[in-house]
Amino acid sequence: MQLPGLWPWLCLGWGWGRAAEPSPSCLPLQFRSPGDFVLGGLFPFGKDTVKLAARSEPTPLLCERLFTDGLLWALAMRFAIEQINNCSWLLPGVTLGYDIHDTCFEPLVALQPSLLFLSRDGTGAIGVRRDYTDYRPRVTAVIGPHKSDLCLLTAKLFSSFLIPQVSYGASSEALSNTELYPSFYRTVPSDKNLVEAVVLLLNRFGWNWVAAVASDDEYGRGAQALFLSVAATDNICIAFEGLIPTELAEPGARRQLENTIRLINSTKVNVVVLFAHSVPAQALLEHGIAMGLGKKVWVGSEAWLLSDIAASTPNIQSVGTVLGFVMRTATLPGFREFVAELLGSVTREEFCRRSGELSGPENPEALDTRCRQCGNVTLGDIWPMLGVTAVQPVHVAVYSVAHALHRALGCTSTGCPKTAVRSWQLLQFMNTLPFEVNGQSFRFDQSHGTNTGYKLIFWAWRDGTVTYLPVGDYDQTLYVQKSRIQFHTADKKEPTSECFRRCQPGQFRRIKGFNLCCYDCTDCSENTFWSSTDSTRCSPCPQHQWAPARSTRCLERRDRFLFWDEPLAVALLTLTALTASLSGAAALLFLRHLQSPLVRLAGGARSLLALLCLLLQSLSCCLYVGRPGAALCRLQQLSYALCLNGCLSSLLPKALEIGLVTEFPRCAPRLLRWVTHGRAWLTVAASVLIQALLCLCHLHLGPDYLVADYKSLPSEVLLVCGTRSWAAFALLHGYNSCLAFLCFLCTFMVQSPARRYNVARGITFATLIYFIIWIFFVVIFATLRTVLRAVTQICTILATTLGILASYFVPKCYILVFRPDLNTDDYCQSPCEEQPGEDRQ
């Protein structure tokens, strides 16, 4: 049996729990339409005491809109049930009834009729059983409620009894957990789909610096958390994330809204993503206008985009551009006519009388509801909202239960078997085959939801009235008609919203401040390269490669050593040739005058050996030019040490001879024979042999080796001979230093008569120059790691060679060439041949 009227349940729940004065219209306590299968309906008609934080009186527009939305959703349920009952093939012979209650958007209020739905059919009590297989509750399925936080409460309750619950508005992703809520379904997409669409929209316009604001309820918190996680993987930076209160009458609500506006303004973002219901969204926009918040792009959802509560805020046009996604729904054929017919009949006396008779509660103490505002609702109040409020999800929710009943009962086109169907038996049929509503196919996915896609709408203002202009759609992919969107900027183009600028090739992001998405673009340094657009650092080049500053790739390193053709090498080789030529010329000159007194005084053939060693020492500079190798590195120090030792060993007998004669005259007669004449060669040979043994020790302890140095030069590989063991280096060159020091001690205090040639002075200056050069050489050689290390060794060899030539051999060459008159036995007398008496004069 069906009730022909609407008014009794229309009035249900407006003044929940309060005594209300009777009105001239029909005001029954409760409405219940009987049938073979009863659907429970939870619809939000709103509360008559809703207050904004900035106001102390109820807002008539707010109350009217909340009431109108709930009324239209309830009308859609009634419309769908009447269509099904009048359908000849869906449930033939079966009548659907309904039991509709108001949630008032309050969890406790929604819980009371939910418990009533769970009561055993025909009673007001819930049976406590071990097995609910044969339990028959008051309703077969539940439609609603609309909000996510209410569904999270009721879904646990109905899932315990496996009663199908189909929501027409709850989009929280938490409800997609079918293990926690096995009997919960919804005919709207989840927030996950909405968030993916919003992220695609932000990327399409290049907005990567946004603020995320949400209402402090299950819908807002869940949607914001999803958005933050998805945005983080798509290079979208969140400048500010905040929650706005839903209970605007609370004392701290106004302050929280003002703080949110100030923080949004301080971040200097141009895009705000707002997940909120109409009331908190309207409060945020109102405070933004009052506090002078600059124009922004507001990206929203259906929860507030289609609400005239937000659109009717004074001076709302000054907020900027409003974009957002609303669920893609179709119109219900015949629904407008149905609403007009019902609201046109509620004032008839016969209608109210019959409604009162048929809607009496089975238990008068169960629910006592009165309504004072119902008599004021007219068709004019409802009609403007018919084109805005989405009622198709309610219609589809009812049809999903009807199709599940059709399959559970095994109905045919002629009738349905009169068999009992329990609520839990409907679940397997709701999960399977798709169903059609008005020619459109629907089915529940694995998370028990339907994804019909979204429309992208734009608030277009015409003569002060908002028009919801479709500018795109989303169904796995996003399509946007940018030309139809007129932004608030001067050129009507999309504004930019970036904390950073796009880095150029060869630049990386340097994070600044506390937000990881704010950074400066910094050039890549040498030997690093830019690897990707979003890189926060430059990648180092491999060791064998290099890169200039701000490079996008690495280049191969060139080998660096002292090349034969570079100017510095040419200059050094020229000086080497001159030094070698000077040594060779001096050797030839000494060879020509080998028997002359001056050459005999200088050492005779030993001086010729010293000059040949200096010649070889000069030529050893060529070992330091060109590409070095392992063999060359071993040979460099050895050649220098042996050649220098040959020279110093040749000078040693003469220095010892001078020292013995001048400092130890009593011991001189016995020892002079070992440092003069033929036996002096034994001293030279012994000294050279000792140096040769030290060279072998150097090779054993740690010879120089080839080093490929990648750090000293930015773009080249420095090939240089490195010192493996400084102890071996000191042992190799320390012996020559000892020889030089011994020669210096034997000669530096010796004075010759004015009529005699002072051979000791040449040895003193030669060894002194050697020490000065080596002091500088050791300091520089130990610290240099460039190609100048080879240059330093060449310069040291040449300086030592030239120092010995200039101080010891050149003066003698001068006498041999330009003053042959001094090359006499009298002037060039050997110290051992001088008479003691003459020395004392």
Image: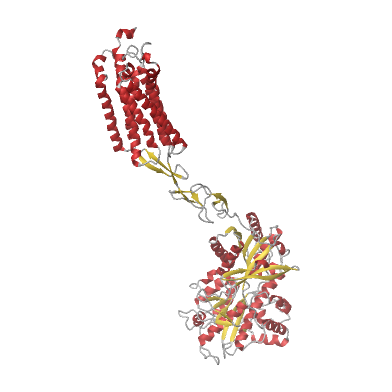
Q: Quick check: 508 above or below 599?
A: below
Which residue appears farthest toward the bottom when viewing the image?
Answer: 414
Q: Residue at x 60, y 63 (%)?
A: 202
Q: Quick check: 462 above or below 358?
A: above
Q: Quick check: 84 above or below 460?
A: below
Picture coordinates of residue 131, whole percent (x, y): 46, 80
Q: Is residue 758 left or right of residue 267?
A: left
Picture coordinates of residue 267, whole percent (x, y): 62, 55
Q: Quadrant of the N terminus?
A: bottom right
Q: Is residue 33 left or right of residue 557?
A: right
Q: Is residue 254 visible?
A: yes
Q: Is residue 53 visible?
A: no
Q: Nearer the viewer, residue 401 or 124?
A: 401
Query: Quadrant of the rendered structure where residue 340 is?
Result: bottom right
Picture coordinates of residue 283, whole percent (x, y): 67, 63
Q: Quadrant of the C terminus?
A: top left
Q: Residue at x 51, y 85 (%)?
A: 408
Query: Quadrant of the rendered structure where residue 494 is?
Result: bottom right
Q: Nearer the viewer, residue 364 or 40?
A: 40
Query: Quadrant of the rendered structure where residue 720 is?
Result: top left
